[in-house]
Image (cartoon, rainbow, N blue to C red):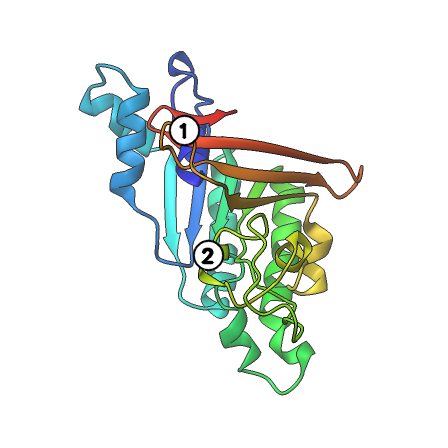
Amino acid sequence: MLYHLVARCILPAEHGGLEAEVVFVDTDFHFDMLRLVAVLEHRLPRSSEEALRSCLHRLFVAHCGGTAQLLLTLHYLEGLFCSRPTLSLLVLDSVSTFYWTDRGGGEGVASQELGLRKCAELLQRLLRDYRLVLVATTQAIMRNYPAADSCGAADGSSSSSSSSWRGWHSTDTDYSKPYLCRAWQKMVTHRLVFSRADAGQDGRQVFSIVSSSLRSKSTQRSAFYVGEGGVQFL
């Protein structure tokens, strides 16, 4: 999904893009440039190498290996945001990567959350000062443990990996319940919860999405699949 989002932003207007610049902060080290190039090539019919390079020049990628490095990277990126007004989108994948390592690095909750809290406060200022759009991912964490009589049950709508957790019983709220620090939760205006659904009749993997606005309290549910041409809603 993030590859198609980035592609839509950096593509030229004549090919349905926004011609906007994007910063992608990769904390999971999962960013695959070749995958992004494949998406761009599909969206650029008869594209030349120069057209592809022009798109990629609008993308800046940074890799972080810890919360402290993430904080330093965000401070460094402020100079980039200041000098390039066409930078419109900041993608952070994922903001929860260092959750467990941070939990083991302090004696109290305040100490454990200090790094992420500083990142959230800096991000809030960057969004305000430079009018950026932030898209951040978090990993789903199952919060509830099964009762004695519910072992072996699995709710197929609860998670993208429900088949791997057949010993657990959970609901959508188990996975979507916020668990990051309060400073981060205050920043969130919209939440999208993705999960795998059953494969369609044509064999395509179908995904479901629950979109909620935390301000209007509205919720929408949709289903979609991802093809080379982009996201197709059902």
* 70 lies left or right of 170: left
The Cα atoms of the two marked residues, 1 and 2, are separated by 20 Å
Vertical relation: 189 (above or below) 116: above
Residue placed furthest toward the right = 216
Where disc 2 sits, the SS reads: helix
Q: What residue is at 80 percent from the left and 37 percent from the top?
A: 216
The x and y percentages for residue 171 are 65, 55
Residue placed furthest toward the bottom = 107
The amino acid sitting under disc 2 is Ser
Vertical relation: 12 (above or below) 40: above
Residue placed furthest toward the left = 49
Instruction: Check contact, mark 1 vs mark 2: CB within 8 A.
Output: no
Which image quadrant for residue 69? bottom left
Q: Earlier in the sequence, mark 1 or mark 2?
A: 2
Read off the residue under disc 1.
Answer: 201
Read off the residue under disc 2.
Answer: 163
Q: What residue is at 47 percent from the left and 40 percent from the top?
A: 198
Q: Quadrant of the N terminus?
A: top left
* 234 lies left or right of 202: right
**Front residue (pair 71, 102):** 102
Where disc 1 sits, the SS reads: loop
Tell me if mark 2 has few (under 14), some (14-19) or many (20+) residues whose alpha carbon lies within 10 angstroms of its own: few
Which image quadrant for residue 204? top left
Q: What residue is at 27 percent from the left and 34 percent from the top?
A: 37
Tell me if mark 1 has few (under 14), some (14-19) or many (20+) residues whose alpha carbon lies within 10 angstroms of its own: few
Q: What residue is at 53 percent from the left and 41 percent from the top?
A: 82
The x and y percentages for residue 232 are 46, 25
The x and y percentages for residue 209 are 58, 39
